[in-house]
Amino acid sequence: MKPELLFKVDAPVYRQRLAGAFTLIDYPPMAALPEADVRCRARVLVTTGHAGASREEMTTLPALSLICCIGTGYENVDLAAARERGIVVVHGAGTNAGAVADHAFALLLAAMRDIPRFDASARRGAWRGSLGARPIPSGKRLGLIGMGGIGERVARRGAAFDMEISYHTRRPRPDLPWPHFPSALALAEAVDLLVVAAPGGASTHHMVDAAVLKALGPQGFLVNVGRGSIVDTAALVAALREGAIAGAGLDVFEDEPEIPADLRALPNLVMTPHVGAAAPEVQGAAAELLRRNVELFLEGQSVLTPVPEMRERHS
C-alpha cells in the first residue's frame, strides 16, 4: 500500500510529481472530511502558509507527523501545537526566491513606468496623449523590509540598477554590505522605493502603516511580494488616493483571494493575483523538494528544509 498524503490545497504540479509513489487524498476545503480510518492513519498533510494547519486539525489527525507547506510561508501553521505533538513542519525554502525577486522588479518597473496605462493607450490606437514622463528605478534608494532569500535577491537586482540598498529586519545581518535600519519607519524615511519581502504573522502585521507610507513620501513607490497582512490596506488606499505616495505594486493581499474594490479602482496601483512564484521552473523544483522531504521523513532521515523554528531538531 502506498503512503497516503492529505492535500489541503489544489496544486496540480505537486500532485503530478507525487502521484506515482503516494496515494493522494483531498482534505477540507478541497473535499469532505475523509473517513475516520483515513484520518487515523494519515501521517502527512500538504498545505500552504495561507491555508495553514490549526491545532484543531492536528487533533483530528492523531497519526500526523509531517506538515509540508508549499512555498516559503508557513504563517498559519500552529507551530506551538506542532511542537507539542512532535510534528515536523517543512517549507519550500529557496525554491521560489529568484522568481519572486524577479516579479518584485516587474511590479516596480510597471508601477514606476506606468506600463498598464501606456499599454492601454497604445491598444486604443492613441499615441502618448496626456500621459507624462515617468521616473526610472536606476540610481534610486531602495529599501527592503525582510532580508531572507527573496529580499537578498531583490537587493542584488537593485544593485545592478545602481541603487543604494538598505534594509530592515529584526536583527542586522553582519554578512551583508548594506546598512540596517531598526524599524520600517526609519527605513521608509531614508529611501525612495520600498519593497516588502518579509514573512507574515503577528510580528509583521500592518508593519507598513500610514506613518510608514507618509515617510516614504509623495515620490515614493511601494511593492509588496511578502504577505498581504504586512501592509495596512486602508492606509495604502488612502495614501494612493491622496498622493502621499506616488504608486504601488502588489502581488499579495490581506484577505486573499478577495481584492477590495477600493484597491481595484486605483489608477496608480499595479496588481497581480499572488503569482510571483508561478513559474514552471519554480514549480518543478519545489515539487521535487516536497517529494524528497516526504520520502526522507518516511525513511526516518532528516528532512531537507524544516522551518527555521525547527532546524536544530530536524535537520
Image: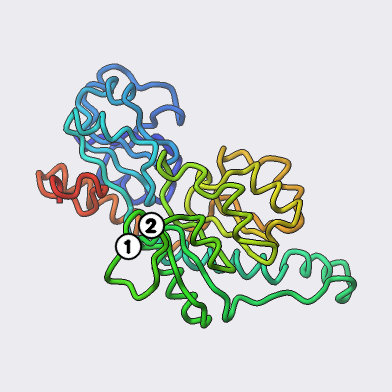
Q: Dots 2 and 1: beta carbons under 8 Å?
A: yes
**Residue 15 seen in this snapshot:** no
* 61 left or right of 297 in image: right
Residue 40, image x and y in percent?
A: 23, 21
Q: Judging from the image, what secondary structure is the residue with disc 2 in?
A: loop
Q: Which labelled disc corresponds to residue 313?
A: none
Q: Residue 182 appears in which quarter of the rendering? A: bottom left
Amino acid bearing label 2: Thr
Q: Which residue is mark 2?
A: 169
* 169 left or right of 252 in image: left
Q: Is residue 66 above or below residue 29?
A: below
Which residue is depicted at the point 27% across and 50% down?
291
Amino acid bearing label 1: Pro
Q: Which labelled disc corresponds to residue 172?
A: 1
Q: Judging from the image, what secondary structure is the residue with disc 1 in?
A: loop
Residue 300, image x and y in percent?
A: 9, 44
